[in-house]
Amino acid sequence: MFRVKICGVTLPEDARIVVARGADAVGLNFYEPSPRFLKPENADAVVDVLPGGIVRVGLFVNASIEQIHKTWDDLGLDLVQLHGDESPEFLRELGGLPVMRAFRLGKEGIAPICEYLEICRKLMCLPELVLVDSFRKGQFGGTGATADWETARGYPSEDWHPPLVLAGGLTSENVAEAIRVVSPVAVDTASGVESSPGRKDSEMVAHFVEAAMAAFGEAR
């Protein structure tokens, strides 16, 4: 669906930068406590500058079914990213919206993710993608901390498991190595390409996309 997602885009000018520098997915953060929170009334202006072919991802943390559906309809999103404590039953209640389920990789390792997906499989509500992020107590991502790559590479490879997206402290300096170690289908960054929280730096985005795409090319 995408290779490089830049998350936490808050302004139209930053959305233009991300697209011009070659990313193929943009993340819009609707979690209010986040420094990258995008007010719903400002989201139209960001989405309006995104050309066709760019995957529009809405990030939600413990939001209601109604809020997610309304945002999906209002903005014409392509993917819902659930980054909170949403249960497998919650995914089923979304009624078929495509989901990227994010997990913070803690000391328990991959096991809780596998257990969660097993339940989703039984409920016939598997997410389209699984995103692995770093763990920091009390925070739902966007910390800049690097995920445990060695643990992430243990993600199951059976055909029924959703493809893996890697996040957590990725920058232009480490993304190529992360791709080589973990072999994800895509990567996701926010703070790794910012001059300040919520503001994307054009050169940092360019270097990140270039490094990631080169590494994906070598992995073929």
Image: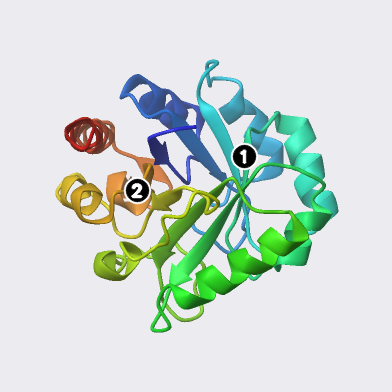
Residue type, numbered disc 2: Pro
Q: Which residue is mark 2?
A: 184
Q: Are the residues flagged by discs 2 and 1 in contact, CB closer than 8 Å?
A: no
Residue type, numbered disc 1: Leu
Q: Is residue 52 left or right of residue 80?
A: left
Q: Is residue 30 left or right of residue 16?
A: right
Identify which residue is drawn at 25% across, 31% down. Answer: 213
Identify which residue is drawn at 64% across, 35% down. Answer: 43
Label 2's element?
loop
| Observer able to see residue 84 | no
Give the foreground label among 2 and 1. Answer: 2
Whole-number angstrom distance, CA of label 2 to CA of label 1: 18 Å
Q: Relative to 50, is 136 above or below? A: below
Q: Which residue is mark 1?
A: 79
- The quadrant the C terminus occupies is top left
Residue 150: image location, x then y, percent: 25, 68
Residue 159: image location, x then y, percent: 50, 49
Mark found first going from the N terminus, 2 or 1: 1
Q: Residue furthest front?
A: 158
Q: Is residue 165 left or right of residue 29?
A: left
Label 1's element?
strand
